[in-house]
Image (spheres, rainbow, N blue to C red):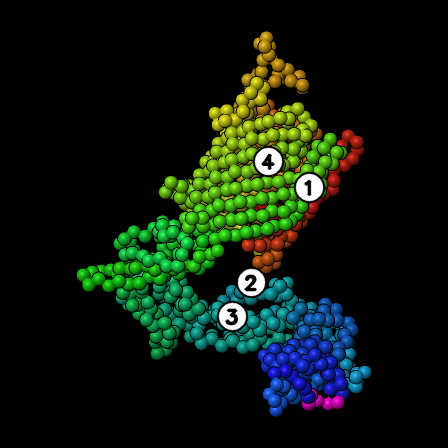
């Protein structure tokens, strides 16, 4: 069936004006749902054009004799068009006024006039704390070029002034302290009120706040009038009066907890907000009931219920309404203990993966807290999109003391195979392309197998030394990584992770090919504290090196124990808590590091990274302090065939080993100092870049960050920051630390924040050529701090 004809029941001028909108529907298949959606979109179209009284509906539907066509008759009216012109509308955006006008017209249907427009503008100004504005509206009626009716509103505005609060009175407030009420008024006030300006909207809202305060103090029959606001003769100051009839204050005479043991009753009475002998606080009754029920369930009465949840039976008043009793009737039932469990929905996940997280012992008391902990443990596996825990009572005739509980654990599995393609750009490595194939529930045992490949091309050569910077040789960097994760290594609580990496990277003074393998075991001692032990073996082939020390082959075998205390409330975008980390890397020939004449790798490297987050005055403050120490342990002097000490190029004795450049501290990545390029911040006091120095003895680094953040919503945040950092060789001197400061914008995502920062140096250095360092630098990073 197709639409053969559309007839419009409208004026001739409207038919001419609207016919183009319906032309496209002739000969189209008849679909009543699609056509009604079109009519709705047509209404929105003409509403946005100023036809606020536009009206359209299907009046009649005729089917042709052969049943293959349909003829529609539409009842339609454009109504008059309204246009608005504003002059002098300071502090008000035209779009805000129009939006309020549209809302008013929708509510009032066809009625709208100059009085409505004046009232709208007046209210908008008063919401901004501006009163006594002069508003003049002229109305002209006419026709459009299509001969349609149009009304033009010309609005001339003389903006008023903010009105200072002179005084606020609370007449009739005798039993509740007036100073306390006044303090409450300003503490809960709007920004205008807190700055001592009149805000009518808040004045009306405060009536509700004040009523709640009286209810908290036992005045259930309080009556509070709307505020009476009066202006001074010059309309620059205003006063307000609230009339209050307090009524009786009701005291709480007793709290009856039916069927509750005496020891538990005492525990409840000492913990809830309503206290015997104090005023009845009806505002907190709901929270008290939730607290009591949860406390009872935590005692093992998992299926306990409160029988009388309606307020009339909960609170019983005396005849004079001067005192009351809270009466709570419990269906306590028996304590619940764990018997067995059943798992459903695990099509791929092996049963034992879920079993080892249940951790309930037969006969153990069931409580809401234990159930919540089980849900959290199962959720943290990352294997399930939905988890249900359903306890069932199992009656045993021979047992009257307990309910035996069978627990049904229902899960819905996530897709365990993920393929990711991620093109992007970073200021440190340039344009990049990475892909990742992840098997997150490998063999159904919550094991992870990940294969990741990445390639990048640097667009900026400023990180390279002078020779390599001038040559501007391009080199495609890459990384191929395979990793395997086993959460229960050898059926213990140890988590195992093994990785193998082949990569090519550019360093300041050389390029290098890496072959690396590592094995790490981790043990969580609690939800916050963990330790790990990692062994790593790297084979590095360094080429295109500027300095002799960076040429050739290096093999590094190292073992690294570490401790972590993580008390952040959120691991992705933390706003409270902190994380403390300490690691010690020991590289030695014992662990298969290279040992040749004059090139022994033997060092220790200690790093402590600590971050803290706290809230104050609507801002989140993020702080970071990191410190590192490394020492070359191969400090025996190298001797020649005659037994004489070998002298190095700088005139000092040459040691048997030194710390490879690839392992020397560098302020980059998580330890970067915003406002500096890597070449600038990685220079020592001597002016040399740390990559050009042979670290024979000791090296240090320090890094500080302080960043106040303001979160506009869950997706966007703004920040200031101050970063400090320095590298040291030989001696640690924190007084020479360099600092940068700047502004940042954060886009918050489920996998961390995408940070756009611009930092400037707080003190720029002058080079020998009288050229200064760059003023500042833009940084793009993902979730570093």
Nearer the N terminus, badge 4 or badge 1?
1
> Element under label 2?
helix
> Element under label 4?
strand
Task: Please name whichever residue, 76 or 250, is drawn nearer the observer in this view of the structure.
Answer: 76
Q: Which residues are magenta?
A: 8-12
Q: In the figure, residue 311 lies in which quadrant?
A: bottom left
Q: Which residue is at 34% across, 70% downward?
A: 326
Q: Which residue is at 35% across, 57% downward?
A: 343
Task: Please name whichever residue, 475 or 90, is drawn nearer the observer in this view of the structure.
Answer: 475
**Residue 654 lies in the magenta-colored region:** no
The percent position of residue 148, horizontal first and vertical second, equals 77, 85
Nearer the N terminus, badge 3 or badge 1?
3
Which label was assigned to residue 458? 1
Rounded to the nearest whole Å, what is the CA distance between mark 4 and mark 3? 54 Å
Depth check, mark 3 against mark 1: the one in front is 1
Rounded to the nearest whole Å, what is the CA distance between mark 3 and mark 1? 63 Å
**What residue does disc 3 label?**
210
Q: Is residue 643 above or below residue 538?
A: above
Side (left or right) of 182 relative to 370: right
Depth check, mark 2 against mark 1: the one in front is 1
Q: Is residue 12 visible?
A: yes
Task: Please name whichever residue, 624 or 128, is drawn nearer the observer in this view of the structure.
Answer: 624
Labels 2 and 1 touching (C-beta < 8 A): no
Depth check, mark 4 against mark 2: the one in front is 4
**What residue does disc 2 label?**
187
Rounded to the nearest whole Å, what is the CA distance between mark 4 and mark 2? 43 Å
> Element under label 3?
helix
**Residue 10 lies in the magenta-colored region:** yes
Crowd around label 4: few <14 · some 14–19 · many ≥20 (10 Å): many
Side (left or right) of 265 relative to 780: left
Which label was assigned to residue 702? 4
């Amino acid at each position: 069936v197709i639409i053969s004809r559309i007839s419009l029941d409208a004026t001739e001028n409207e038919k001419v004006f609207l016919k183009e909108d319906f032309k496209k529907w002739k000969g189209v298949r008849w679909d009543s749902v699609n056509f009604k959606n079109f009519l709705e979109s047509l209404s929105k179209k003409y509403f946005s054009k100023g036809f606020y009284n536009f009206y359209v509906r299907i009046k009649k539907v005729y089917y042709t004799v052969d049943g293959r066509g349909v003829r529609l008759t539409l009842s339609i009216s454009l109504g008059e068009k309204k246009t608005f012109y504003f002059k002098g509308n300071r502090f008000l955006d035209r779009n805000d006024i129009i939006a309020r006008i549209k809302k008013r017209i929708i509510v009032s249907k066809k009625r709208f006039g100059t009085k409505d427009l004046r009232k709208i503008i007046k209210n908008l100004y008063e919401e901004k704390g501006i009163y006594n504005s002069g508003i003049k509206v002229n109305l002209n009626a006419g026709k459009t070029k299509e001969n349609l009716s149009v009304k033009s509103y010309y609005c001339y505005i003389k903006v008023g002034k903010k009105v200072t609060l002179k005084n606020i009175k609370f007449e009739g407030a005798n039993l509740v302290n007036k100073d306390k009420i006044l303090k409450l008024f300003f503490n809960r006030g709007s920004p205008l009120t807190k700055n001592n300006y009149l805000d009518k909207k808040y004045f009306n809202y405060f009536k509700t706040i004040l009523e709640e305060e009286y209810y908290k103090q036992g005045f259930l029959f309080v009556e509070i009038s709307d505020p009476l606001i009066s202006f001074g003769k010059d309309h620059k100051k205003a006063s307000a009066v609230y009339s209050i009839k307090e009524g009786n204050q009701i005291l709480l005479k007793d709290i009856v907890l039916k069927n509750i043991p005496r020891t538990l009753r005492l525990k409840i009475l000492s913990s809830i907000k309503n206290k015997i002998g104090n005023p009845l606080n009806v505002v907190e009754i709901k929270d008290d009931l939730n607290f009591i029920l949860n406390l009872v369930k935590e005692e093992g009465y998992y299926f306990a219920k409160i029988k009388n949840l309606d307020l009339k039976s909960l609170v019983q008043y005396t005849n004079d309404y001067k005192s009351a009793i809270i009466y709570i009737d419990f269906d306590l039932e028996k304590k619940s203990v764990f018997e067995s469990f059943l798992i459903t929905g695990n099509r791929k996940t092996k049963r034992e993966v879920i079993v080892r997280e249940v951790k309930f012992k037969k006969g153990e008391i069931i409580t809401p807290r234990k159930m919540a902990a089980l849900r959290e443990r199962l959720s943290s596996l990352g294997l399930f999109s939905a988890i249900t825990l359903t306890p069932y009572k199992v009656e045993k005739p021979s047992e009257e003391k307990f309910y035996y509980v069978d627990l049904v654990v229902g899960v819905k599995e996530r897709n365990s195979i993920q393929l990711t393609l991620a093109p992007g750009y970073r200021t440190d490595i340039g344009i990049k392309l990475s892909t990742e194939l992840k098997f997150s529930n490998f063999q159904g045992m919550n094991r992870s197998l990940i294969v990741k490949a990445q390639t990048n091309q640097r667009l900026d050569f400023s990180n390279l030394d002078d020779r390599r910077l001038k040559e501007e040789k391009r080199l495609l960097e890459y990384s191929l990584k395979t990793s395997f994760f086993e959460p229960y290594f050898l059926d213990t609580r140890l988590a195992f992770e093994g990785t193998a990496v082949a990569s090519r990277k550019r360093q300041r003074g050389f390029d290098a090919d890496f072959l690396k393998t590592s094995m790490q075991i981790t043990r969580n001692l609690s939800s916050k504290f963990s330790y790990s032990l990692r062994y790593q073996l790297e084979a590095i082939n360094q080429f295109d090196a500027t300095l002799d020390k960076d040429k050739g082959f290096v093999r590094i075998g190292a073992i690294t124990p570490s401790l972590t205390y993580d008390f952040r409330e959120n691991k992705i975008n933390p706003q409270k808590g902190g994380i403390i980390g300490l690691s010690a890397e020991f590289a030695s020939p014992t662990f298969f590091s290279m040992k040749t004449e004059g090139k022994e790798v033997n060092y220790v490297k200690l790093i402590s990274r600590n971050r803290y987050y706290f809230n104050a005055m609507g801002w989140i403050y993020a702080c970071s302090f990191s410190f590192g120490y490394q020492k070359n342990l191969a400090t025996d002097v190298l001797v020649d065939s005659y037994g004489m000490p070998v002298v190095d190029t700088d005139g000092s004795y040459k040691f048997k080993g030194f710390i490879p450049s690839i392992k020397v501290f560098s302020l980059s990545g998580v330890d970067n100092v915003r406002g500096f390029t890597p070449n600038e911040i990685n220079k020592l006091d001597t002016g040399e870049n740390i990559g050009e120095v042979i670290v024979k003895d000791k090296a240090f680094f320090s890094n500080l960050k302080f960043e106040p953040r303001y979160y506009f919503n869950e997706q966007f945040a703004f920040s200031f920051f101050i970063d400090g950092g320095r590298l040291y060789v030989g001696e640690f001197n924190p007084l020479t630390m360099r600092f940068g400061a700047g502004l940042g914008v954060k886009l918050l995502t489920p996998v961390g924040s995408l940070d756009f920062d611009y930092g400037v140096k707080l003190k720029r250095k002058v080079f020998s050529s009288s050229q200064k360092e760059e003023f500042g630098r833009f940084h793009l990073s993902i979730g570093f701090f």
